[in-house]
Image: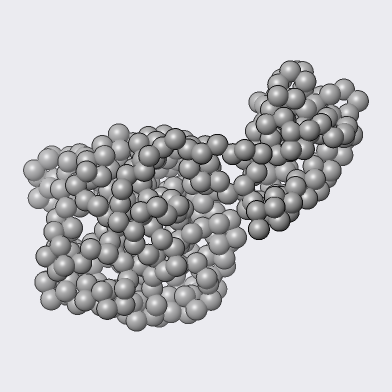
Amino acid sequence: MAHHQSPIKRRQSKKIWVGDVPVGGDAPISVQSMTNTRTVDVEATVAQIRSLEKVGADIVRVSVPTMEAAEAFRQIKQQVKVPLVADIHFDYRIALKVAEYGVDCLRINPGNIGKEDRVRAVVDCARDKNIPIRIGVNGGSLEKELMQKYHEPTPEALVESAMRHVEILDRLNFDNFKISVKASDVFMAVGAYRQLATQIEQPLHLGITEAGGFRSGAVKSAVGLGMLLAEGIGDTLRVSLAADPVEEIKVGFDILKSLGIRSRGINFIACPSCSRQEFDVINTVNALEERLEDIITPMDVSIVGCVVNGPGEALASDIGLAGANGGSALYENGERRERLANDTLVDTLERRIRARAEAIKVCKA
């Protein structure tokens, strides 16, 4: 089926590379998450990274707070394929150590690591090994003097903090970096990113920080990131949820999918269901979403419980189901094919969707 291109015009930014993943320029907007295991528990951290890889994470961030964690990072890095960002605060020696161990990006704010010679050591090492730096400004941890100047976190305060770090890297002639200016308040974050987007050419890493639990955090992130992405702002993103990191990746892709920016996996079109439904729409869709998580081929699947909207949606989908009494109508690639028994829908649909995904993949190859 024809998948519509997004009308959004992206902000022009410099392309950098996090491992083998391009960020910025004409690269697809990458989706990332962060592990929440103890980094020194190598086995648990590797297992979580692999589960993130499975649902399509482009980049994974790992907190490296100690030298012991840096040694664990070395082992973790050897066991996973996805590019890893090391999250480091204050101690420049940890940054040098993980750089030696093959880190793909350093999340470290140059202004927070002390004397000029320490900053220079990290920047020289990053330049030497072609490792990008991510500057990460957060509304909850602004510098004391900025809090005195602005009295509270504001978009202007976030941007001023970011530009202080940028000026340090400029002075050291280092431009291989990306920036985030996150806040838990949607309008503060959006305002900061809008301002920053006009001041630098480097890629922007989007996020609404500490967004909340699964549902409220997903909604808040969709609103905030959606506003920015619709304006063409943003090159990589993380949805911050107090939930399983795997959910962050899924919600991230759902946000991009809803804006027509990037498709990965199945876009389910489903009715909210009403008394006209001829089968249990909600349970059918939930079961299919769970069973078909492994499919990465972009495709539209419509599951509608009756003949009012069912045929129209089905005709525009790769696979569609329109509920009917005595057997629901299956459509494939815009054509009505057959009736399916309503009591075995999930098994039959799973089989047909997998076959269709395979056919699309072969067709594109």
In this view, the residue in front, 47 or 131, is 131
Q: Is residue 54 left or right of residue 126?
A: right
Q: Is residue 317 left or right of residue 227?
A: right
Tell me which residue sits at (65%, 53%) in the image: 364
The type of colouring in the image is one colour
Can residue 224 be seen from the camera position used here?
A: no
- Residue 255's place in the image compared with 94, above or below, is above
How far across and how far down the image is residue 149, in percent?
A: 8, 43
In this view, the residue in front, 297 or 151, is 297
Q: Give the number of marks.
A: 0
Q: Quadrant of the C terminus?
A: bottom right
Q: Is residue 166 left or right of residue 3?
A: left
Find residue 1 and report its image quarter.
top right
- Residue 164's place in the image compared with 326, above or below, is below
Tell me which residue sits at (35%, 54%) in the image: 25
How far across and how far down the image is residue 218, in percent?
A: 48, 40
Find residue 286 and report its image quarter.
top right
Q: Is residue 314 left or right of residue 77?
A: right
Can residue 217 be seen from the camera position used here?
A: yes
In this view, the residue in front, 14 or 303, is 14
Tell me which residue sits at (37%, 64%) in the image: 17
Tell me which residue sits at (84%, 29%) in the image: 328
How far across and how far down the image is residue 272, in percent?
A: 66, 26
- Residue 194's place in the image compared with 117, above or below, is above
